[in-house]
Amino acid sequence: MLLDEDTPERVWGIDFKGNETYSGMAMRNIIALESPSFFRKFRFWNRSGFDFDATELRRDEIRIQRYYQRRGFPHVTVRSEVREGRRDWVRRIDFHIVEGEPTMIRSVRYELDADEEIISLLEEQREFDRAKRRQLLQEGRRYQLIQHSDVEGLFLSTLRNLGFAFAETYVTAQVDTAGHVADVLITLVPGSMTYFGEILVDGHQTVPESIVLRHSDLKTGDQFSSRKLRTAQQQIFGHPLFRFATVNLPPQEPDSLVDINIRVREHALRSVRVQAGVGLEEIVRLSVSWMHRNPLGNAHTFSVSTRASFREQRANLDYHIPYVFNPKSRINISPFGQRLDEPGYILLRGGINNSFIYQISREAAGTVSYEFTRNREIVESSDFRLPDEEQRYNISALTFSGYYNKLEVEQYQGWAFRPYAEFSGLFGTGTLRYNRYSLDVRRYLDLTSSTQLALRNEGGVISRVGDHDLPSNIRMYAGGTSSVRGWQRRQLGPKRAIFDGDGEFSGYVPVGGKAMYHFNLELRQELHMLIRHFGMAVFLDGGAVWERISDINVDDMQFGVGGGFRYQSPIGPIRIDLAYKVNPTDEDLKIFEGEDFGNWFSRWGIHFSIGQAF
């Protein structure tokens, strides 16, 4: 270790005093000097970085002062104090901030530079009125110069959405520094009403221009709206034939007709995709798919896919129609065959699924599906004297599902809702008659910039079951890497014993039920300050499965607690969780007729997967 006199001066702590309006966290984000975090200080073997620089310290004083001045504190003063630590190389910095009296907005005035007809039109628009109420520079608030651009952008976007493609907006203010008040003037120059003129398409090769225009939903003569341009770009980009799309205004002189340019790049007509993964539930999984885009020159797609693991093997043919009566509507036709090997039974089935999907918005969509399948289920008998039981049945089911989801790619935020309803055996079709309902609700709360609380509630019931017992594949289950951890896949809830050929007890298999509920509560903490891309989580899960709806009782809830690590890889979070069963049953611990067939690990569950638990 270096001697103190040979060790360069290090910033070992930064504190802010007198900052009432903005937190120390906000201040740290605008200064250049840094101090090590609590965890970083334990890395005594590596003291690189965090150098003390007196010149940078003076610049940081100016940065803080300007930060406050642009946010309505014209007379702010900032002074730094450097204190030595117990070691010669340690420097602790205190920034003393005197905010002073802020400048408040005394009045806000709007000036519309347009004729009376346009002024009257704008004042009748709810969107324009909403923009006036949402804009940041309101009477009685603190005047902040930094908000000028936000207000200008809000009104510019509003005017362009209302048909004024060449609108201009300006924000100015008269500031009385002695009286600490400001009078704000918002000037709006909408120009003339505009309409879509010529719509040019560039970059298409195999897809006809008419299909690109149809999917954009832009039509010559319609009133201009920048919102329509954004929607058109999203719709084209979401089409399976295009890998790139932009919709914008080329340079042009202001006029009542606005020319639009659509530029696209197509995917290859044919492609092969191979994916592989590992996990404790499926062990190894592999999928291969081949897609043919635009097979008939009508912008549809056709694909063949197979996937296999130690639990499931499935083959699909998919024909996708991306436009039905508008770009938000699509149909998918998918005949398939499947073999499913679950604890206690093997399912062989084949059939066809037809789905109609409607994308209401970027956050919400709904699906109506009809599925017909022929099923053969082989159930491992609980009585060793009997052969395996086999049942054959057909399912004819109509399902309705939807989602509202503010989550972005790899960003877990806000609320998510996923309702589901299934009606089997309608109008006397199929062998089984039942109704199935479920709801999945999720909430993500950012406690700090690196800490998140994630919550999930999911429940479901199966009702109106006819004069038959439900096959194993139809029943509801809980437990597993994305359910109640501590239990392996489907292992939470009622179970039955199974025996080997000699009549010896060999274990329990789940039987499922007609009602299910589970919740997850997880605290996620990033550990970037220690190891880049790493994080950890602690969680509490709980749930129950009931064989009948009449059996529902909150006292049956079982709980699992645990924690794990996350690594943010390019393909998603790699997750390892270890969970402990708080209140297991004898079946969970493999106790049969008073004899313990389990081991010390029966109370634990290990889960490994790619992706968050929820």
Image (tube, rainbow, N blue to C red):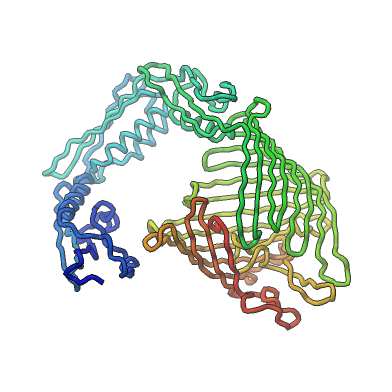
Which residue is at 25% across, 60% downward?
50
Q: Quadrant of the N terminus?
A: bottom left
Q: Nearer the viewer, residue 563 or 159?
A: 563
Q: Quadrant of residue 296?
A: top right
The picture places residue 68, in percent across and down from the top left corner, at 21, 49
Which residue shows up at 54% across the image and 64% down it? 576
Q: Nearer the viewer, residue 147 or 306?
A: 306
Q: Please, is residue 117 above or below residue 435 in the view?
A: above
* Left or right: residue 395 compared with residue 21: right
* Residue with the most extreme left position: 178
Left or right, 97 with reference to 273:
left
Residue 183 can be seen in this image: yes
Tell me residue 427's x, y (percent): 81, 43
Residue 303, percent from left and from top: 68, 38
Can you say which quadrant of the picture contains the C terminus? Answer: bottom right
Quadrant position of residue 19: bottom left
Residue farthest to the bottom? 594
Seen in the picture, residue 328 relative to 468 is either above or below; the reply is: above
At 54% across and 26% down in the image, what residue appears?
A: 217
Side (left or right) of 428 relative to 531: right
Whether residue 100 appears in this view of the structure is no
Residue 390 pos. (x, y %): 85, 59
Residue 159 vertical position relative to residue 58 in the rendered view, above or below: above
**For residue 212, above or below residue 139:** above
* Closer to the camera in the image, 118 or 80: 80
Label count reads 0
